[in-house]
Image (tube, rainbow, N blue to C red):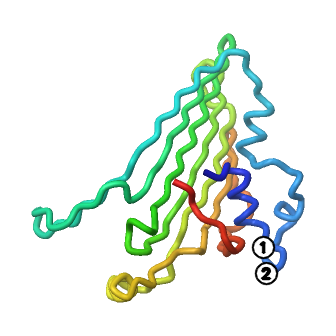
């Protein structure tokens, strides 16, 4: 499975070519805001927890199952908690994706990561980064017809990043939609 940084590179690499670049995107050496919160708050004690999940699908009509398929995708959650005296750092990372070979071509994936630094249970700073596949279907009927024709794909991603501190909340850059480089796939 690609790492968050590899996926970010896949998503943001074409942006300058498409004219979507901002100073933050062009400055690829700058870490994500989540990385900054983690780097600015190194703590000695960490308690990591990771869980992986398998996604199954069930199609129902009026609550009655008519079709079921196992292993249509996968996901993981990573929870890290660190503390030192009265300071506590909590980092959450959740990512998942579908398996197009098992979902009649549906190709969705996404990831979100958050980091929160507290002192005496009061938030000092927090940051988030996330992306999710989006589709260009305008209505349920459009999606249905593309699904039947096995042409429903989602290769466009919406990316969001932000940072919060007491009295201040900032979204870093605009919502960004871009195409990943050719050959980029979610690995289950």
Query: Between 52 and 121, which is closer to the camera in this rendering?
Result: 52
Residue drawn at the location 69% of the way across and 14% of the way down? 84
Q: Is residue 167 left or right of residue 63?
A: right
- In the picture of the structure, the residue carrying the numbered disc 2 is 18
Q: Is residue 8 above or below residue 126?
A: below
Residue 163: x percent and y percent?
69, 47
Mark identifier at residue 158: none
Q: Residues within 10 Å of mark 1 (few under 14, many from 20)?
A: some
Residue drawn at the location 83% of the way across and 79% of the way down? 17
Residue 15: x percent and y percent?
78, 73
- Whole-Å distance between the Cαs marked 1 and 2? 5 Å
Q: Quadrant of residue 69?
A: bottom left
Question: Do callouts 1 and 2 mark residues in contact (Cβ within 8 Å)?
Answer: yes
Q: Is residue 60 above or below residue 5?
A: below
Q: Quadrant of residue 124?
A: top right
Query: Between 155 and 15, which is closer to the camera in this rendering?
Result: 155
Residue drawn at the location 71% of the way across and 43% of the way down? 34
- In the picture of the structure, the residue carrying the numbered disc 1 is 15
Q: Secondary structure at mark 2?
A: loop
Residue 38: x percent and y percent?
73, 34
């Amino acid at each position: 499975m690609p790492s968050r940084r590899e996926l970010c590179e896949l998503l943001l690499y074409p942006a300058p070519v498409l004219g979507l670049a901002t100073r933050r995107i062009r400055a690829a050496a700058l870490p994500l805001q989540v990385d900054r919160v983690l780097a600015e708050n190194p703590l000695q004690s960490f308690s990591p927890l990771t869980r992986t999940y398998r996604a199954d699908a069930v199609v129902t009509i009026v609550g009655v199952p008519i079709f079921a398929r196992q292993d249509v995708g996968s996901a993981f959650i990573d929870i890290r908690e660190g503390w030192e005296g009265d300071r506590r750092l909590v980092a959450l990372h959740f990512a998942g994706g579908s398996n197009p070979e098992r979902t009649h071509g549906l190709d969705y994936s996404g990831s979100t990561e958050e980091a929160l630094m507290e002192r005496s249970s009061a938030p000092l700073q927090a940051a988030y980064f996330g992306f999710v596949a989006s589709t260009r279907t305008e209505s349920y009927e459009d999606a249905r017809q593309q699904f039947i024709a096995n042409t429903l794909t989602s290769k466009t991603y919406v990316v969001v990043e932000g940072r919060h501190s007491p009295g201040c909340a900032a979204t870093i850059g605009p919502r960004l939609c871009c195409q990943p480089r050719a050959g980029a796939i979610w690995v289950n």
